[in-house]
Amino acid sequence: MAIRIIYPDDGDRERRSSFTNRLIPESPYRSAGVPIPECRKIAKGLGSDDIELVYIEDVIIKGIVIFSSHEPFEKKKERIESFLPLLVSWMVTDIVSSSLWYGRDEKKEAEAYFTSLLDRQDEMTRRLGIVALMDRDFMRPDSVCGMLERLAGMHTDHYLLSMAIAWYYAEAYTRFSELAYPYFGHLDLPIRKMARQKCRDSRRIGAADKARLDIFFR
């Protein structure tokens, strides 16, 4: 029988629920108003991902259980595949990908799998692949160039996928500014604008590096 998670009411759930629902209008699941740290704590105490899905937090907890499990990546990959239809919001993709665990000797296998998701038709599955590949282990100079070139060729009107591409570019520019800089000129203009704005908003990028991106808009 699926686990039904009962969330305690601390008196502020309604406010948080209303706020979160405004952030995820694309999601068919509404928010229970539960903070993400609490979701992680609940997930850690569960021994199964067989969860009754009522709220977006239920989906997130299910994903955290799957992505954080200490099991062979070959097995985890099967469970991730079964979870892909539940990528109903940017909040789900971003939180579950940040929970990813893999063995030290499985890094190449994990990187190859998430790279393969970029070839899928579903935009949210591709978003998951992009966000997962921003893991520190995967963002190396020898892999970033290939990703920047590949993402520049990913033409889409899907807002959440476009934002993921822009986010990857901004992260690459933050870590390897000289390497990433030339690739901004290859992006479709709407995504290029998103990437520049994310760079402008970053406190990890200096004023000079932010300013020189303006050349791609003259």
Image (spheres, rainbow, N blue to C red):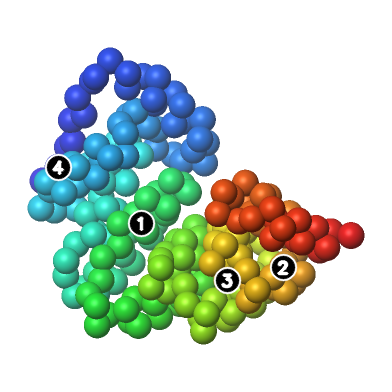
Q: Are marks 1 and 4 in contact (CB under 8 Å)?
A: no
For mark 2, what is the residue?
A: 184
Q: Is residue 107 visible?
A: yes
What amino acid is found at the position of numbered circle 4 in the picture?
Answer: Ile
Q: Which of the image's four quarters has the C terminus?
A: bottom right
* Type of amino acid at the residue the image marks with label 3: Phe
Circle 3 SS class: loop
Q: Distance of mark 4 from mark 2, alpha carbons?
A: 46 Å
Q: Percent position (x, y) of residue 66?
A: 24, 59
Question: What is the spatial separation of the Cα atoms under label 1 and label 4, in whole angstroms?
Answer: 23 Å
Q: Position of residue 92 (x, y in %)?
A: 40, 49
Instruction: Please report whichever mark, 1 or 4, sits nearer to the chain's N-terminal start.
Output: 4
Q: Say which mark, if any, is on residue 115.
A: none
Label 3 belongs to which residue? 176
In this view, the residue in front, 42 or 37, is: 37
Q: Which mark is residue 3?
A: 4
User: In front here: 32 or 138?
Assistant: 138
C-alpha separation, residue under disc 2 versus residue under disc 3: 13 Å
Q: What secondary structure is found at the residue carrying circle 2? A: helix
161 sits to left or right of 40: right
Mark 3 or mark 1: which comes first in sequence?
1
> How far from the left and from the top, in percent, is residue 206?
64, 55
Question: Which residue does the image show at 34% across and 28% down from the upper left?
Answer: 33
Q: Residue at x 54, y 67 (%)?
A: 175
